[in-house]
Amino acid sequence: MVMVQDTQTTQTAQTGGTAGVVTSGDGVVINKKKSAEQYMTEAEQKYIIPALVREKFPDLVKLIYETESMNDEEREYWMQIMPIMTEEQISKFRDILVNEKEQLANLDNEYEQEMSRISARKAPRIDEAKLKERMAEIQKKEKAGEQKEESEEEALLKQLEGMDT
């Protein structure tokens, strides 16, 4: 089973500035606050949803729409194939979708914690006087190094000239 995000058909919706709301390519608004029934109602406007899916698997329709690893064609495929899947296959499919959802939630939490930790850390104050002093010191050393190189070059050139004669 290959699941690929179709980036061309998913775009951020500008619905009242609500974060985490996107619209799938088939027009279904994906929002984790929506109920399974709301997803079913919207999906039925686009696809023929088998009665068995509507009755037994509305939670799977919600999970299918909320997964980030499927494109629209894959979503439709799974809704059409669910009626002929065995209970074991349905169970495994549900486990995969729930596991993905949990892993993404964990990653989001870790990201938020890391961002909070980073923003809580205060950046050290920059002492401009010390910085300018350090820069002047570095420039002085660079200039001394360049002068030393030039004098060494001149000495080598004089040695080479002395060898030719």
Image (spheres, rainbow, N blue to C red):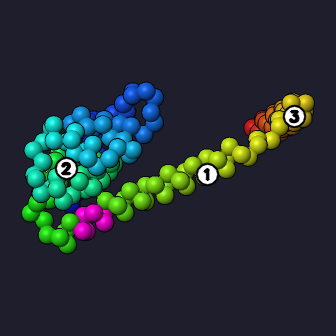
Residue type at the position of mark 1 = Glu
**Mark 1, secondary structure of its residue:** helix
The residue shown at (24%, 64%) is 93
**First in residue order: circle 1 vs circle 3:** 1
Depth check, mark 2 against mark 3: the one in front is 2
Q: Using the image as rendered, state which of residue 54 and residue 121 is in the foreground.
A: 54
Q: Where is mark 1, residue-wise? A: 114
Residue 84 to residue 18: above or below: below
- Magenta stretch prevailing secondary structure: helix
Task: Give the quadrant of residue 27.
Answer: top left
- Residue 92 among those drawn in magenta: yes
Magenta region, residue range:
91-96
> What percent of the width, then of the height, locates residue 153?
79, 36
**Mark 3, secondary structure of its residue:** loop
Residue type at the position of mark 3 = Asp
Q: Quadrant of the C terminus?
A: top right
Q: Which mark is residue 127?
A: 3
The residue shown at (20%, 66%) is 90
Q: Is there a contact, CB below 8 Å, between mark 1 and mark 3?
A: no
Depth check, mark 1 against mark 3: the one in front is 1
> What percent of the width, then of the height, locates residue 33?
39, 44
Q: How many residues crowd mark 1 within 10 Å: few (<14), some (14–19), many (20+)? A: few
Task: Give the quadrant of residue 7.
Answer: top left
Q: Residue furthest bottom?
A: 88
Q: Where is mark 2, residue-wise? A: 74
The residue shown at (16%, 47%) is 76
**Mark 2, secondary structure of its residue:** helix
Distance (Cα) linking label 1 and label 2: 34 Å
